[in-house]
Image: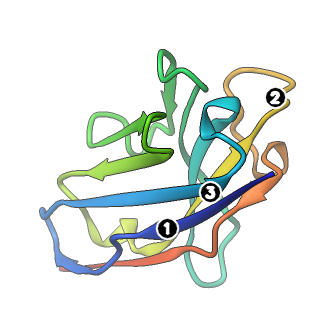
Amino acid sequence: QVKLEESGGEMVQSGGSLRLTCATSGRNFNNYAGGWFRQAPGKEREFVATISWSGASTYYADSVKGRFSITRDNDKNVMFLQMNNLAPEDTAVYLCAAEDSLQRWPPKRADEFHYWGQGTQVTVSS
């Protein structure tokens, strides 16, 4: 199975940019579709973006479309989330996820992913 670890979260000002990294180990990441979710205090885990195993297909939540970009490098077993024009409402713990037996595309629910990282905190100040 695959193990996931996020990094890159920090505090930034509104309008700033961050790139999150999801480093994977264990089974080759190219067997898995990948996803990013986020969770703010007291709120449900929210879908952000997903990418197919090859990287050819991506899908975004409307709230981040045009600002965030999900990519992957299967040779290095990593996945990225580039976040631009950040706003205070983007403040959350960001989690990466992986799944090797998707039932549908795009997967937008947290229960469609079996493997999760611990999360990295992103805080956007106004």
User: Identity of the amino acid at label 3?
Assistant: Ser
Count residues near mark 2 (Cα–Cα under 10 Å), then give few for <14, some for 14-19, many for 20+: some
**First-in-chain label (2 vs 3):** 3
Q: Secondary structure at mark 1?
A: strand
Q: Which residue corresponds to the image point at 62% horizontal and 57% vertical from the top-left?
A: 25
In the picture shown, does residue 108 fall above or below 37?
above
Q: Is residue 66 left or right of residue 23?
A: left
- Quadrant housing residue 33: top right
- Quadrant housing residue 68: top left
Residue in the foreground of this view, choosing between 118 and 66: 118
Alpha carbons under labels 2 and 3: distance apart = 20 Å
Q: Position of residue 17 (x, y in %)?
A: 17, 60
Residue in the foreground of this view, choosing between 14 and 58: 58
**Which colour assignment does the render follow?**
rainbow
In the picture shown, does residue 56 fall above or below 125?
above
User: Identity of the amino acid at label 1?
Assistant: Glu
Q: Secondary structure at mark 3?
A: strand
Q: Is residue 65 left or right of residue 84?
A: right
Alpha carbons under labels 2 and 1: distance apart = 22 Å
Q: Position of residue 55 (x, y in %)?
A: 48, 23
Q: Which residue is mark 2?
A: 102
Q: Nearer the viewer, mark 2 or mark 3?
A: 3
- Disc sitting over residue 6 in the figure: 1
**First-in-chain label (2 vs 1):** 1
- Quadrant housing residue 37: bottom right
Alpha carbons under labels 1 and 3: distance apart = 12 Å
Q: Which residue corresponds to the image point at 63% horizontal and 75% vertical from the top-left?
A: 118
In the picture shown, does residue 24 fall above or below 92?
above
Count residues near mark 3 (Cα–Cα under 10 Å), then give few for <14, some for 14-19, many for 20+: some
Q: Secondary structure at mark 2?
A: loop
Q: Which residue is mark 3?
A: 25
